[in-house]
Image (tube, rainbow, N blue to C red):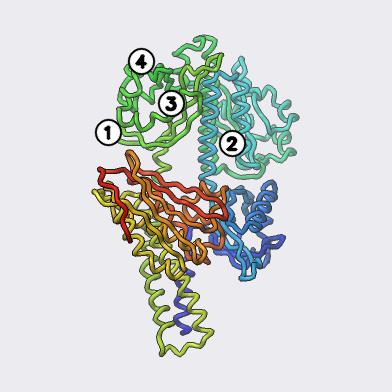
């Protein structure tokens, strides 16, 4: 008995260790005192998990970024009051003083009397995602400002302010080369003290003239990890150190011809070298500043001509185009032409269909129409080229005339194939882990079940009760793993929907027969009004959808009530309905019930035995069929789930009796 328990315990320790996040249980006191915290917190925060247990060295609340603490407290308290899960994204301060973004997903744990016992949850590191999203936003906003013809001062000021908002530990500034070519002048700086700005008003460009003066002199990147000791700052450190800045990094801003126009600089509040993500940010922003400064430099000569625009955009890896209200290209940059193996002149004047192809045009037509109606549109899609495909992020920015009419739109396309590949790797990791967990979990479940049911086990009532809890939770884990695998296979295309003509009425009857035992156990009456209609569908997966919806309806219906299943014959499709008179779904979460692990109430997964994946699986199945699925509900009165499927033909409509 004891060895079996230890074996199970080791299995669960291994399971927790493989979860890509820090699992916790804490009290809901002023410091959220940790009773359990997995070791993954060390990778996330830099502190040992033991430091937080019973607040031995610090509390989890103490490392939350000060400006975010009130938000976190408010969100957690609201979730507890409403007895629903919380998901909060906020910043923490690591042991090395760096800022890390985390996603905290958890919920209150209550006893049978409704008393709050504590909080269970998981902490995930989302810093990379936040930086990637921020960089994408910065690029889009800056390019939009350039395209709108904003002044150089406004464009670069907004760029600098966006960088400063990324982390409280860094401040950015942009300098420009004076007309004499021998001095730098601070042009944009939202965070540096004015005393220092005045002191370097005409900073000499030279070999030992701070990081920015040296970067302009050498024409390459300069990194200073410690201003106090670096010789580049020997004559200037007394000006900057009193203001708390201890490290710097400068990148020369160059024109297309290689001329140094200025510098883009980051200042840090502690001695250190920049992290890889900070290098990525400054490189991207230096390119954006180069584009903005190059535009102004060219305007006086080219008078906003097409040549000037091309000089700006051809240096970018992004695809840039201008499409008029006839959906014809009026401008594309060189990168756009390179992707489609055509010169810009071959593309200009062509309709979108001619360049993108009829199939892809129909796929994005809705987004084009929204842009031409005056809306800014952003979406992700897979762009198929003649020799390869790319996942891209697309933004369409309407170009309005003085009266508010739409003249066309600017299209900005960025390659996000690497990000998609990373997401695929994460999904594959979840799939592999789930596969690896299925066999041991099944074995554990079988062993526990055998031990509980065996008359020769010699278990006491207390031992049997504990093992029954283990059996229930292990069974839940097995079902969760199976649902994760089902969803992953559908999303990855490993499961093909074999569509063939089948009878909608028969599908309803079969689902009703399967769910009758569960309905009888809950004193629920199942009422069906199936009509014989021929549809084009994968019968097994539509059966799975119907049983999932019926299972939910039965679980959340009161005893001695009824659940209805109907099908209606529409013009081009068939409409299925599953109707119950249960507790219903609150309006504020009705729109998110098809998301993974979404529960109406925090206690549902525990009390009702659900995994939170049944509705997402239904959604994917119906989506694969080209249908739609949605729900209507009135809280306290019941819910109706709908889904549609295309028809392959019509047959006589007759009521089928059960």
- Sequence-first disc among 2 and 4: 2
Could you tell me which quadrant the C terminus lies in? bottom left
Does the CB distance between marks 2 and 3 fall below 8 Å?
no
Residue 127 is left or right of residue 68, and the answer is left
- Sequence-first disc among 1 and 4: 4
Residue 145 x, y percent position in the rendering: 56, 24
From this view, report whether residue 71 is shown above or below residue 196: below
Residue 589 x, y percent position in the rendering: 55, 49
Helix, strand, or loop for circle 4? loop
Residue on which the image places disc 2: 249
C-alpha span from label 1 to label 2: 40 Å
Helix, strand, or loop for circle 1? loop
Residue plotted at (55% across, 29% down): 141
Residue plotted at (33% across, 38% down): 571
Residue on which the image places disc 4: 349
- Sequence-first disc among 3 and 4: 4
Q: For the residue carrying disc 2, how many other residues have a C-alpha within 10 Å: few (<14), some (14-19), or many (20+)?
A: many
Does the CB distance between marks 1 and 3 fall below 8 Å?
no
C-alpha span from label 3 to label 4: 19 Å
- Sequence-first disc among 1 and 3: 3
Residue plotted at (32% across, 24% down): 353
Helix, strand, or loop for circle 2? strand
Does the CB distance between marks 1 and 2 fall below 8 Å?
no
Between label 1 and label 4, give the one nearer the viewer: 4
Residue on which the image places disc 1: 387
- Sequence-first disc among 1 and 2: 2
Closer to us: 25 or 172? 25
Between label 1 and label 2, give the one nearer the viewer: 1
Count of labels shown?
4
C-alpha span from label 1 to label 3: 28 Å
Residue 113 in view in this figure: yes
């Amino acid at each position: 008995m004891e060895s079996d328990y230890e074996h199970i315990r080791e299995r669960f320790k291994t399971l927790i260790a493989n979860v890509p996040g820090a699992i916790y249980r804490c009290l809901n006191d002023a410091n959220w005192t940790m009773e359990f915290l997995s070791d993954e917190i060390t990778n996330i925060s830099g502190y040992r998990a033991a430091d937080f247990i019973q607040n031995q060295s610090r509390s989890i609340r103490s490392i939350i970024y000060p400006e975010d603490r009130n938000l976190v407290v408010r969100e957690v308290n609201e979730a507890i009051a409403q007895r629903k899960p919380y998901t909060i994204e906020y910043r923490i301060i690591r042991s090395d003083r760096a800022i890390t973004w985390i996603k905290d997903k958890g919920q209150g744990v209550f006893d049978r009397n409704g008393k709050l016992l504590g909080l269970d949850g998981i902490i995930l590191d989302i810093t990379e995602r936040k930086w990637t999203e921020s960089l994408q936003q910065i690029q889009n906003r800056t390019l939009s400002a350039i395209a709108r013809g904003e002044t150089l001062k406004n464009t670069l000021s907004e760029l600098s302010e966006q960088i400063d908002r990324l982390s409280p530990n860094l401040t950015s500034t942009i300098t420009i080369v004076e007309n004499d070519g021998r001095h730098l002048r601070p042009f944009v700086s939202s965070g540096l003290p004015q005393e220092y700005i005045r002191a370097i008003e005409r900073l000499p460009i030279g070999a030992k003239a701070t990081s920015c003066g040296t970067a302009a002199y050498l024409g390459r990147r300069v990194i200073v990890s410690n201003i106090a000791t670096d010789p580049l700052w020997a004559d200037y450190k007394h000006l900057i150190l009193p203001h708390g800045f201890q490290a710097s990094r400068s990148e020369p801003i160059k024109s297309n011809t290689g001329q140094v126009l200025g510098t883009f600089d980051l200042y840090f509040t502690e001695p250190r070298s920049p992290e890889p993500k900070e290098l990525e940010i400054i490189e991207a922003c230096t390119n954006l500043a180069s584009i903005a400064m190059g535009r102004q430099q060219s305007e006086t000569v080219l008078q906003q001509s097409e040549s000037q625009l091309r000089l700006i955009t051809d240096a970018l890896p992004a695809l840039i185009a201008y499409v008029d209200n006839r959906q014809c290209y009026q401008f594309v940059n060189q990168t756009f032409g390179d992707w489609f193996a055509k010169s810009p002149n071959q593309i200009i004047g062509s309709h979108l269909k001619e360049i993108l192809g009829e199939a892809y045009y129909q796929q994005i037509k809705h987004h084009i129409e929204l842009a031409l109606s005056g809306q800014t549109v952003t979406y992700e899609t897979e762009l198929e080229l003649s020799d390869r495909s790319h996942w891209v992020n697309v933004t369409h920015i309407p170009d309005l005339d003085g009266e508010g009419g739409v003249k066309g739109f600017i299209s900005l396309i960025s390659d996000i194939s690497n990000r998609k590949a990373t997401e695929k790797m994460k999904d594959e990791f979840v799939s592999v882990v789930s596969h690896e967990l299925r066999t041991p979990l099944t074995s554990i479940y079988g062993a526990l079940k055998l031990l509980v049911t065996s008359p020769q086990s010699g278990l006491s009532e207390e031992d049997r009760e504990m093992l029954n809890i283990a059996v229930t939770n292990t069974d839940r884990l097995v079902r969760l793993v199976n649902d994760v695998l089902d969803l992953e296979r559908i999303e990855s295309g490993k499961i093909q929907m074999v569509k063939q003509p089948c009878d909608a009425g028969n599908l309803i009857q079969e689902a009703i027969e399967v769910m009758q035992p569960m309905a009888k156990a809950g004193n629920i009456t199942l009422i069906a009004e199936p009509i014989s209609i021929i549809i084009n569908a994968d019968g097994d997966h539509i059966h799975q959808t119907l049983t999932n919806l019926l299972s939910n309806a039965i679980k959340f219906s009161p005893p001695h009530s009824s659940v209805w299943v109907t099908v209606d014959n529409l013009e081009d499709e068939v409409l299925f309905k599953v109707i119950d008179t249960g507790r219903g779904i609150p309006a504020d979460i009705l729109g998110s019930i098809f998301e993974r692990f979404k529960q109406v109430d925090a206690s549902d997964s525990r009390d009702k035995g659900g995994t939170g994946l049944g509705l997402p699986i239904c959604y994917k199945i119906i989506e694969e069929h080209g249908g739609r699925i949605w729900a209507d509900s009135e809280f306290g009165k019941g819910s109706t789930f709908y889904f549609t499927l295309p028809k392959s033909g019509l047959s006589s409509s007759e009521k089928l009796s059960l």
